[in-house]
């Protein structure tokens, strides 16, 4: 009986929060795409155009490194990086764009960031799956060898990016300098992220240094999911999860600080 009395309010609170996040996702969709030319389809079309353009550069490349096909390699790397880039950079203006919603007691800054993260991750994953299906139909790619591993890598990328996004939301709201720096920093992170290389292609000591970057390990995990012939000795799932947990806790703490500075 005591357990039921505790679980019932928790279930109710979770249902309310899920409804709030769902409503925020719909609002974001309508605000961002609802009145544009192709409407909600632009949510998927945008990452498809970007990732498709990158893959076209490699479509005539017949040089395969150890069974790594260039087109799916480029598609996976760029779509996964789009998840990171979109979640992190869109956190910059999340509070300014949605601050009036904080008049509603049930809406929190956390909910706003979750809604944006879910939207960005879902659109990039759908775009990746559609592009891979098209590449397979054209004969320039094969289906993912370990689809669950690939999806796990994309989920970890989303979690990692969400943790960073909470810190970015706080920093950019409180500091104009952070507001100016976030976009250049994210784009400078691309060459070091592992989006377009494997660690085994990099000579030491740079390989060792890069292997400590959690983004690089997530991309290595993504490649394991994509290609049957690839196994990376540089992946430590516990290390990646520890980073995600640490960023989440730091992000939640930063949102507590941010709430004190937000006047609503």
Image (cartoon, rainbow, N blue to C red):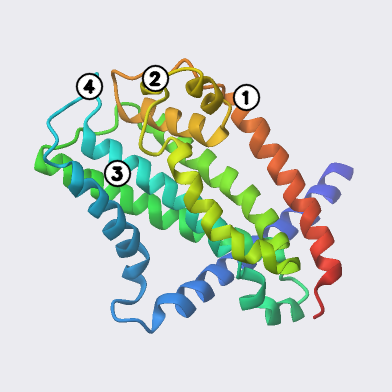
Alpha carbons under labels 1 and 3: distance apart: 26 Å
Where does the image place residue 122, in percent across and percent down from the top left? Answer: 44, 54
**Of the residues under marks 1 and 3, which one precedes in the sequence?**
3
Determine the secondary structure under disc 2: helix
The local crowd at label 1, few if under 14, some if 14 to 19, many if 20 or more residues have their Cα within 10 Å, is few
Q: Is residue 188 above or below residue 71?
A: below
Where does the image place residue 70, in percent across and percent down from the top left? Answer: 22, 34
Q: Could you tell me which quadrant the N terminus lies in?
A: top right
- 106 left or right of 209 in image: right
**Of the residues under marks 4 and 1, which one precedes in the sequence?**
4
Mark linked to residue 119: none
Q: Is residue 226 above or below residue 164?
A: above
The local crowd at label 3, few if under 14, some if 14 to 19, many if 20 or more residues have their Cα within 10 Å, is many
Determine the secondary structure under disc 3: helix
Alpha carbons under labels 4 and 1: distance apart: 28 Å
Mark linked to residue 67: 4
Q: Which residue is mark 2?
A: 200
Mark linked to residue 238: 1
Q: Which residue is mark 3?
A: 75
Front-lying residue, 252 or 200 = 200
């Amino acid at each position: 009986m005591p357990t039921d009395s505790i679980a019932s309010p928790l279930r109710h609170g979770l249902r309310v929060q899920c409804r709030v996040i769902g409503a925020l996702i719909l609002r974001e969709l309508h605000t961002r795409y609802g009145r544009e030319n192709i409407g909600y389809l632009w949510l998927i079309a945008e990452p498809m155009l970007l990732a498709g353009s990158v893959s076209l550069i490699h479509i005539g490349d017949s040089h395969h490194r150890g069974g790594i096909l260039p087109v799916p390699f480029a598609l996976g790397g760029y779509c996964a990086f789009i998840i990171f880039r979109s979640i992190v950079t869109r956190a910059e203006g999340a509070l300014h764009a949605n601050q009036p919603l904080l008049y509603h007691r049930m809406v929190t800054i956390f909910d706003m960031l979750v809604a944006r993260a879910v939207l960005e991750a879902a659109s990039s994953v759908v775009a990746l799956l559609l592009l891979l299906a098209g590449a397979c139909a054209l004969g320039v790619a094969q289906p993912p060898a370990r689809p669950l591993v690939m999806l796990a890598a994309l989920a970890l990328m989303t979690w990692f990016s969400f943790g960073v996004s909470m810190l970015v939301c706080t920093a950019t709201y409180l500091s104009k300098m952070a507001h100016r720096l976030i976009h250049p920093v994210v784009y400078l992170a691309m060459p070091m992220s592992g989006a377009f290389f494997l660690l085994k292609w990099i000579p030491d000591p740079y390989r060792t240094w890069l292997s400590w970057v959690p983004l690089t390990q997530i991309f290595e995990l993504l490649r394991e999911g994509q290609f049957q012939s690839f196994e990376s000795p540089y992946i430590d799932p516990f290390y990646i999860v520890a980073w995600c947990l640490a960023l989440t806790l730091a992000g939640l703490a930063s949102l507590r600080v941010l709430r004190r500075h937000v006047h609503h």
